[in-house]
Structure formats: structure tokens, C-alpha cells
Image (tube, rainbow, N blue to C red):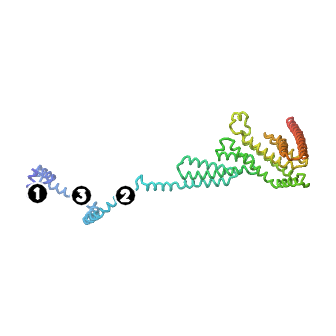
Amino acid sequence: MAEALYDLLFPDDKEAPPSPDDLSYLSRLSSLPLVALQTSEPLSLSQSAHSLQLSLQSLAARSHAPITSAAAHLAALHPALPALASHSRALTPGLQTLVHTTTHFTHLFARTSPHLARRQATLLLARTSARLTDLLGLPALLSSAIAASSLSASSNYAQALDLHAHIKRLLALYPASRLVRSVAAQAEAAMRGMASNLVANLRAHGLKLAGAMRCVGWLRRVVPELAKGDHGVAAVFLACRLANLRSLLAALEPLRELADAEAQAGGKGRGGWEGGQQAERYLKRYIEIFREQSFGIVSMFRSIFPASATAPLETAEANALQPPSPLATFALQLVSLLAGTLRTYLPSVRDRASRESLLTQVLYCAGSLGRLGGEFGLVLALLHDDEEEESESEGDAGDEEREARVQVRRERLREWVEVVKKHRVLAGKLELLASGVGQGKEGR
């Protein structure tokens, strides 16, 4: 019905088919009575037209600016499309170059590329430059601490040992690093210099017990090979103090030269040299220095190395293959040093009182070392035996000269016996006096 009505109303519009809205409206019209078509339908159509017109006016008032802008852009779009096409055609060869360059860059800076590894190493160096600077400054800081150290300022030595321990820890953590190995090698060279300084301190004059103990403790830490047993450090200590003793005795060279010249002149028969005053002066000063220094060395050694100084005999017998304590051989070295000097210059002293004074001084020296276990009083008696052997070796001497030498040996033996008796009497009186003072203090 709706289609027939559409053909009737639009006979000339055969080509365009009716829309669904048109057919719906025509179906509605065909369902209305004639009166409604004549009266109410025109009014409804006019109201709908007026409502649509108001809606269009409101829409035009609200959206006229976007619509105008859209129309302008649409008008400009048509001439821009050919330019866009031409530019796109010109960009196509550049895209191929870009793809080739991107592929080359990707292969060049892959994860396994040496360039990328070098760049990462450079960035790592830039991030850790401060730490590397501190690490490179450790040897110089260690050398400065060692150079500024002394026995009185022990904090610098302690800081040097802490720095060396830190460098050794770094070497243990990074053994493959060439930089750490180089720093460790420089630190070892500086520690060898520190060991030399410690040995020089042990050889210095006027070394005190506290300084010696600190020096030995540092030497054990600097040279751990010596710290495996007390014998190594003890031997170094005794060798250094013996060198100091020899240097002090070498300072008496002018007196020794005078004593030698006196002996040579006495042999030629000059009466002014027969008393042996120069030999007496030399021996007196020699024995005094020897007594002070030997007692100080042995007492200091027993304080620093009590285990080596007071080793029990059972331990020595059980470990017969181990070397003895350095103190035992050191005492023999001291005694041989003194005995050689006495054997050379004591015969030049002709005056009996002077000889007794020197022998008494030697006995006091032996007594002071005897309190520390180094008594050598019997060595003086052996000196006369050595002289007798020397005289017997000279077989070409005459009977009178041989008789004179025998007489001299007998006098010296009696002299030695008298000196020992006097010394023992005096020592007994001193012991009685000391015991009396001690009892008096206890009575109070």
C-alpha cells in the first residue's frame, strides 16, 4: 500500500527507491481517516517543521565556528594532498639509508662488541675515579706514615701497619687486578723500608725498654717470617744491640791507638811508656762501656723475650735438634769480645794497683752479668793459661827469659787470687749489709 501510494505521488521518480522513513510515513498516512488528513495532519506537519527549524538554528548558533574551521581545513586539504605525495616519494630513498645505518649500528654496538665493552669500561672508570684515586694514593700515604714515624710517635707506625693490612685485604679480594698488584708491590717495598727503619732503631744509642718492646712488636708484624718463632726476632735484636756495642767500643779508637803506640814504644825500651797508663785508660773505659751495655742488652732481652731467656732444660733436651736460644751464644760472643781485648792490652799494664783495679772492674762486670745468668769470672783465669801456651810456643827464647816469664805468670796468678778474694769479701759484706737493711725494714 505504501509503495503504491509512493508511485502515485512520485510518478517521475522511478530510479530512486523509497527510503524506509518514506514508506513508514506513507503507511501511517494510509491508516488515518480522511478527516484527520484534512484537519490534524497539516497542523502536525507544520509543528514538526517549526521544531526542526528551531533545532537547526540552535545547532548553527552553537557550532558555527567548528563548522567554519572544518570547512576551511577541508578546502585546504585538496591542494596539500599532492605535496604530501611528492614528499613521500622523495622520502622513500632516505628510508632505505636509514634502515641500512640502523642495522650497521645494531651490529656495531651489540652486547659482545668491543666498542660497547670499551664504552662500559670508560663509564665504569668515570664512576669509580674517586676510589681509584684513593687506591693509587695508598702507597704514598704509607710511605709518608713510615717516614714520619719514630719510637716516640708510635701512632704513625700503627697507621702504616693498618694501611698495609688493608692493601693485603684488597689483594686477597682482587688478585687478578694489575692495579691492585702494583699497589701491593709498592706497599711491600715501603714495608721493607719500614723494616730497615726498625732495625736502625734497634741499633740506635740510648734505646729504652719500652721503645725496644714496641719496635720488636712492629718488627714481628712487618716481617711475619721472623714471628714464627722467637729465635728469629731475638737474633735480630741481639745482632742489632751487638752492632751498637761495637760502634760504642769503636769510638774508643783514639785511646786504643795510644795504647798500641805505648806497647810498641815499651817494647823499644822507652822508660816513659813502661807504666802502661794509656792501656789502663783504654781498658778502664772499655770495661765500663762493656759492663753498662752488656747488662742493659741482656736485661732488656730477658724482659722482651722471657720464653727464650728462661727456657727449661727439659724442653732443650726434648728438642735437641732445634737451635739453642740466641742468648746463650750471644753471651759467649760478649765474653770472647772482652777476653780478646784483655788478652791484648792487659799485659801492657805494669803497675800492680792498676792491674788490680782493672781486674776488680772486670769482676764487677762479671757479677752484674752473673745476676742475669752470664757469669764469666773464670775467663780471667783462662787468660793466664792462654799466655802460658803462647810462651811455650816460643821455643827459641833463652833460659833466663823463660824463667822471667814463669816468674811473671806466678805473680799474676797470685795477683788474680788476691783480687778474687778481696772481691768475694767485699761482695759478702754487701750481701750482709743488704740483708740487714731488709731485716730492719721487716722489723719496722
Q: Earlier in the sequence, mark 3 or mark 2?
A: 3
Q: Name the residue under label 1.
A: 15
* Front-most of residues 175 and 2: 175
Q: Which of marks 2 and 1 is nearer the N terminus?
A: 1
Circle 1 packing at 10 Å, graded few (<14), some (14-19), many (20+), is few
Q: In this view, does 373 lie to the left or right of 134?
A: right
Q: Name the residue under label 2.
A: 104
What's under tag 1, amino acid-wise? Glu
Determine whether the residue tagged by mark 3 lies in a helix, strand or loop: helix
* Front-most of residues 267 and 335: 267
Q: Whole-percent x and y of residue 278?
A: 86, 53
Q: Which of marks 3 and 1 is nearer the N terminus?
A: 1
Q: Do the residues labelled 2 and 1 touch (CB within 8 Å)?
A: no
What's under tag 3, amino acid-wise? Ser
Real-space CA distance between mark 3 and mark 1, rounded to the nearest whole angstrom: 32 Å
Q: Whole-percent x and y of residue 186?
A: 60, 53
